[in-house]
């Protein structure tokens, strides 16, 4: 799947993957897609919750891969 920016959050523990994602998404325009790589077990809950709270769209997540892969579309 196509994405506009990448964030490698492997090795980071809660809340760092979300904080880094927030910072990286600020540099993108609405509708652009951020791919996040994460291996923090809490990311499974934290990243979807972050998307709901901030108005972003969690397009996909691959929890079977190592690291996990998330695609987030920036909201308006």
Image (cartoon, helix red, strand yellow):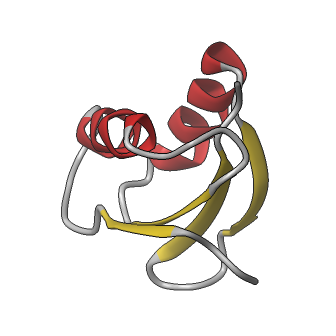
User: Could you tell me which quadrant the N terminus lies in?
Assistant: bottom right
The residue drawn where x is 74% and y is 47% is: 58
In this rendering, is residue 75 above or below 64? above
The residue drawn where x is 64% and y is 54% is: 32
The image position of residue 18, as x and y in percent, is 38, 37
**Residue toward you, 63 or 74:** 74
In this rendering, is residue 31 above or below 15? below
**Outermost residue toward the top?**
53
The image quarter containing residue 42 is top left
Left-right relation of 75 to 46? right
The residue drawn where x is 65% and y is 51% is: 72
The image position of residue 33, as x and y in percent, is 63, 59
Left-right relation of 36 to 60? left
The residue drawn where x is 55% and y is 69% is: 4
Left-right relation of 73 to 28? right
The image position of residue 50, as x and y in percent, is 56, 27
**Residue toward you, 6 or 43:** 6
The image quarter containing residue 61 is bottom right
**Outermost residue toward the front?**
29
The image position of residue 5, as x and y in percent, is 46, 67
């Amino acid at each position: 799947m196509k994405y506009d920016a990448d964030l490698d959050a492997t090795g980071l523990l809660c809340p760092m993957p979300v904080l880094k994602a927030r910072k990286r998404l600020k540099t993108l325009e609405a509708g652009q897609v951020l791919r996040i790589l994460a291996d923090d077990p809490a990311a499974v809950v934290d990243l979807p919750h972050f998307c709901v709270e901030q108005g972003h769209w969690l397009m996909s997540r691959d929890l079977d891969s190592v690291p996990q892969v998330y695609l987030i579309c920036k909201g308006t």
